[in-house]
Image: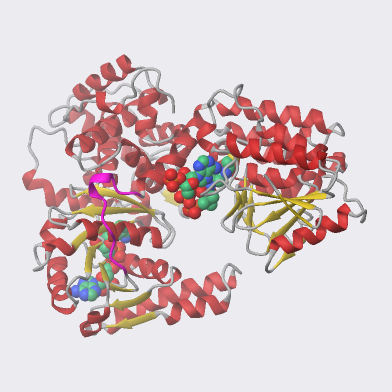
Amino acid sequence: MYLIHNGVAVIQLDHPPVNSLGHALRKTIHTAVVAAQADSGVCALVLIGSDKAFSAGADVSEFGKPEQAAFPLITDVFARIDACTKPVVAAISGVALGGGLELALSCHARVALASAKLGLPEITLGLIPGAGGTQRLPRLIGVAAAYAMMQSGAAQTAQQLEASGLLNRVVERDVLAAALALALELGHGGEALPRARDRQPDATAARAFIEAQRARLTPRQRQLPANMALLDALEASTDTDFDAGLKTERSLFLGLLGSTSAKALRYQFFAEREAVKLPATLQAVPKSFETLGIVGAGTMGSGIAICALDAGLRVILLEQDAAALQRGCLRIADHYAARVTAGKMKASVAALSEARLTPTTDWTLFSRVDLVIEAVFEDLAVKQDVFRKIDAHTRAGAVLASNTSYLDVDAIANATKRPQDVLGLHFFSPAHVMKLLEVVRGTQTAPEVLATGMALGRALKKTPVPTGNAFGFIGNRIYNAYRKQCEFMLEDGAWPEEVDAALEDFGFAMGPFKVADLSGLDIAWRMRQAQASSRDPRERYVDILDALCAQGRLGRKTGAGYYTYTDGKAGKTTDALVRQVIEAASSRRGITRRPLLPEQIQRRALLAMVNEAALLLAEGVASRASDVDVVLVQGYGFARWQGGPLFWAQQQDRATLQTDLQQLARQSGWGFVLADLEPLLPTSGATL
Ligand code: COA
Ligand code: NAD
């Protein structure tokens, strides 16, 4: 239960991997504190976790499940610690997150290793801290700092928090010894430390701050109920009655627990952790890699190089000529210089990263690489030519990857004599920022090569998601279906700004026509021209984009696309010329334009995504429904708190979903393939 060191009871939290506060661990702590309180041989208590985790907080998988059978609840444990008449010291190493940090806050003092990471990430799960965090933290560090920590959900190191008032001592090593020393001081009648609950906040200033923050919440922030609840809970912390504040916090927390946004965010939490693992049938031992070869130092190649350097890998970056190489290197150097100037990275760390980079135009250096990522122009012939060179210059057994967005990975692999070593690694732009990485399995990709792609993704701190080799893989294929449906809606009667507004209201970061203008309409135009000869004339093909491009409206970069831009800012509505182009398209198709309500727009766009996702799953391109949701959230601006298109589908009434999908098929015309949604929908009564 606990060990006694010099009269201090040391309670070890031992619930691998991360000491999440599930029922068993709560019971252990509660029992140990009760026993230590009663033990006359004990003058103080220390709570300590593992090197990896003091505690990662409440067990997320218990959220949404019935509470009654679970005494002691987390709040019972904290109340017990709070009421302990002997000093209780938290010894923090690894992470103290969410309920884990609240556990430390309920202790009477806190000692942490400088490297420990502390945070209250509940907002990222659509919640607020529900076990005293919103009441104790402002009493310790002030309402503004507490709000910043809870509103961002981001963790900070103990070193960063040293002067905040949260920690009593920060040490470089041996946190247990430091905690024991403090516990002994306090236990032997040293100066008593006021518990967090006994401190009084400056209520007037705090209330003014909270009011100002309420007024500053953006409409997008207001879509997440936890953002408002957090301010309500903080307001309760300004009350002198601590227990009343705790009650308010708990009831706000419980109110959020069953909300759709909290369910969706919990679902994403587990979906992301599932996505990065290969399904059992595809698992294999990854190859090791230390040196990466990157071909092409353009937008993507230089971004990929940055994340590989940051992950401690050596990078040999190859370009076709010295000028292009210099441009790429400059981009990388500028990135590091900006990080250092912004205080986000130490100059010494940046220098170490840059020292691992070898820029070259000499293919013979590729004999040293373990893994190659090709990021040259999106042109099959160019890529095949590059892969022949890669094949000629890399050692047997090296893993060879292409960052193609749409091209056939098999056609690229077959340019080499070792297609089993080839796969796709589809990074997103900017590659050093975006978390998503589609790991594409070609027909002949060997299992250990696929596993190496996944391992590289994890090493680069990405979310690697396995996908089959089909046009657009998972993400671009679904996005194309969505965008196509949005174009149908233009022909049917909606204006671009109505479609964009409806989808932004649903939670997309940006509507599809604004996205198209931002990326440049000419990319899609070129692809459409390339596909023109193979397009079936019966297909419902919307040529509005082609007409805009023909008039030189290529998007934001030319000052006009679907929208007209003044000083880089889009007009609120599309102009007369765009409306004429759209009306002409409607009349060519014989459509009498009818306005669409925002809910109709949202539903059609979502159904199109759901249908395409079901096809991808049936074809085996996506392995798991939840992978699709991870891809859409991480790579395409689908609101995380809406869970993803398949999570959305699972919340809908089944019968209506099926009827609406059939109507969508009719609206979409020839070429629309209706998917079977049954395998995606939960059996009745299943909960998320
Ligand atoms: N509840 C339940 N399970 C948790 C958990 C929690 N709070 N935190 C982590 N886990 C599980 C993960 O699901 C994973 O399980 P798996 O191996 O079966 O997939 C395992 O612990 C390891 O987590 P993972 O995220 O893969 O490891 P990591 O070393 O990359 O990160 C943490 C560790 C603690 C930093 C990270 O898991 C984390 O941020 N957890 C969430 C903390 C949180 O939000 N707490 C607030 C709850 S109120
Ligand atoms: P880019 O034009 O910025 O860079 C391509 C680079 O490749 C250029 O610097 C060029 O000099 C170099 N190159 C061309 N042929 C070469 C050769 N034979 N040997 C060595 N270098 C050569 O292009 P990008 O945007 O970085 O795209 C690269 C790849 O990444 C494409 O396949 C693209 O589809 C894919 N991709 C791009 C994005 C994006 O948003 N830009 C996103 C995901 C994937």
Which residue is drawn at the image coordinates 79% and 55% (left, top)? 165
Q: Residue 295: image x %, image y %?
A: 26, 72
Q: Say left or right for 536 vs 172.
A: left
Q: Say left or right for 208 vs 626.
A: right
Closer-to-camera residue (551/105):
105
Q: Say left or right for 404 vs 654.
A: left
**Figure quadrant of residue 212:** top right
**Figure quadrant of residue 57:** top right
Which residue is drawn at the image coordinates 41% and 78% (left, top)? 330
Q: Residue 490: image x %, image y %?
A: 29, 32
Q: Compared to 490, does 95 lie above or below?
A: below
Total marks shown come to: 0
Q: Where is the C terminus found, in terms of image quarters?
A: top left
Closer-to-camera residue (247/304):
247
Closer-to-camera residue (472/490):
472
Q: Compared to 187, does 31 lie above or below?
A: above
Q: Say left or right for 325 vs 188.
A: left
Asked whether residue 280 is drawn in magenta, I would say yes
Q: Residue 146: image x %, image y %?
A: 72, 47
Q: Which residues are magenta?
A: 277-288
The answer to whether residue 160 shows anywhere in this view is: no
Which residue is drawn at the image coordinates 32% and 17% (left, top)? 654
The secondary structure that most of the magenta stretch takes on is loop
Q: Which quadrant of the render holds ligand 2?
A: bottom left
Q: Compared to 364, does 579 lie above or below?
A: above
Question: Seen from this angle, which residue lies furthest top?
Answer: 655
Which residue is drawn at the image coordinates 7% and 36% (left, top)? 537
Q: Where is the N terminus found, in terms of image quarters?
A: top right
Asked whether residue 119 is drawn in magenta, I would say no
